[in-house]
């Protein structure tokens, strides 16, 4: 089995010491929030709203696959919004996110590939930046971007409302694992079913 870094909460629900859990399967969800866990009908859409109904759909993926969450959303940029994500996950009994992708200010595909390159044995292109080049490290420190041990033989999916096919030149590396979510409705049962099939290798 492979070691993930997970987060232990103190009594107030804040991030506590990082601990190792050797019993987690190497399955990952690169998670966007806006347009995935909220939608065009969410109240005050632009002001950090997460819909419990949509989180419960995410929970179904996690429960049926054992996958762990890596934040690729812009919500990863600050400690406050990362905590908001964790608070919502706790409320809905979803395991906390384990890490974040770096912030290059370029395209999300390359940020995901950087994380994969540095934390797994997934074959990535040679032109990917390193996490040391991530922006705003006071708000998104390197400790949020790296696991203690590289993962092998991973399965992963990317849930996003952005059309990553139009971002950069490296989409082909994640194309068969990308699920485009309709931002007007957010995560759907069809998205969930496809995610489970991809992560459990039953397509």
Image (cartoon, helix red, strand yellow):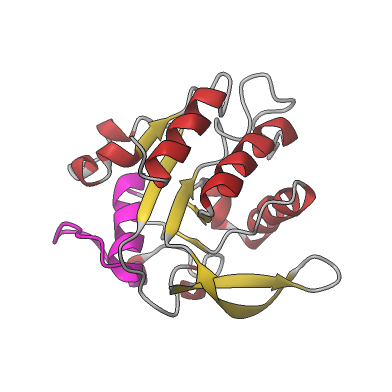
Relative horizontal placement of residue 109, taking residue 140 as reference (left or right)? left
Q: Nearer the viewer, residue 105 or 126?
A: 126
In the image, residue 185 lies at what x, y percent? Answer: 58, 20
Q: Residue at x 74, y 36 (%)?
A: 52
User: Is 182 a magenta residue?
Assistant: no
Vertical position of residue 34 compared to residue 26: above or below:
above
In the image, residue 152 lies at what x, y percent? Answer: 32, 68
| Residue that sits furthest to the left in the current view | 126
Q: Nearer the viewer, residue 150 or 31?
A: 150
**Quadrant containing the C terminus in the rendered view:** top left
Vertical position of residue 122 compared to residue 15: above or below:
above
Q: Residue at x 27, y 44 (%)?
A: 174
- Residue span colored magenta: 106-132
In the image, residue 4 lies at what x, y percent? Answer: 49, 71
In the image, residue 118 lies at what x, y percent? Answer: 31, 69
> How many numbered marks appear?
0
| Residue that sits furthest to the right in the current view | 11
**Quadrant containing the N terminus in the rendered view:** bottom left
Q: Give the quarter of the image for residue 39.
A: top right
Relative horizontal placement of residue 194, taking residue 140 as reference (left or right)? left
User: Is 109 a magenta residue?
Assistant: yes
Q: Is residue 9 visible?
A: yes
Q: Residue at x 13, y 61 (%)?
A: 126
Vertical position of residue 1 compared to residue 193: above or below:
below
Relative horizontal placement of residue 110, taking residue 169 as reference (left or right)? right
Q: Is residue 161 visible?
A: no
């Amino acid at each position: 089995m492979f070691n993930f870094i997970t987060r232990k909460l103190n009594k107030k629900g804040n991030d506590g010491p990082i601990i190792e859990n050797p019993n987690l399967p190497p399955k990952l969800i690169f998670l966007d929030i806006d347009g995935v866990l909220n939608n065009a009908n969410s109240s005050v859409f632009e002001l950090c709203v997460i819909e419990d109904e949509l989180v419960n759909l995410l929970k179904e993926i996690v429960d049926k696959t054992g996958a762990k969450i890596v934040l690729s959303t812009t919500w990863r940029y600050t400690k406050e919004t990362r905590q908001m994500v964790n608070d919502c996950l706790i409320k809905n009994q979803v395991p906390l996110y384990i890490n974040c992708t770096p912030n290059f200010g370029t395209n999300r595909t390359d940020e995901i590939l950087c994380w994969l390159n540095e934390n797994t044995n997934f074959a990535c292109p040679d032109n990917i930046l390193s996490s040391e080049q991530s922006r705003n490290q006071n708000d998104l420190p390197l400790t949020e971007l790296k696991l203690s041990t590289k993962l092998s033989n991973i399965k992963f999916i990317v849930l996003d409302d952005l059309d990553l096919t139009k971002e950069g030149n490296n989409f082909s590396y994640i194309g068969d694992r990308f699920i485009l979510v309709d931002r007007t409705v957010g995560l759907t049962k069809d998205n969930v079913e496809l995610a489970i099939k991809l992560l459990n290798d039953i397509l």
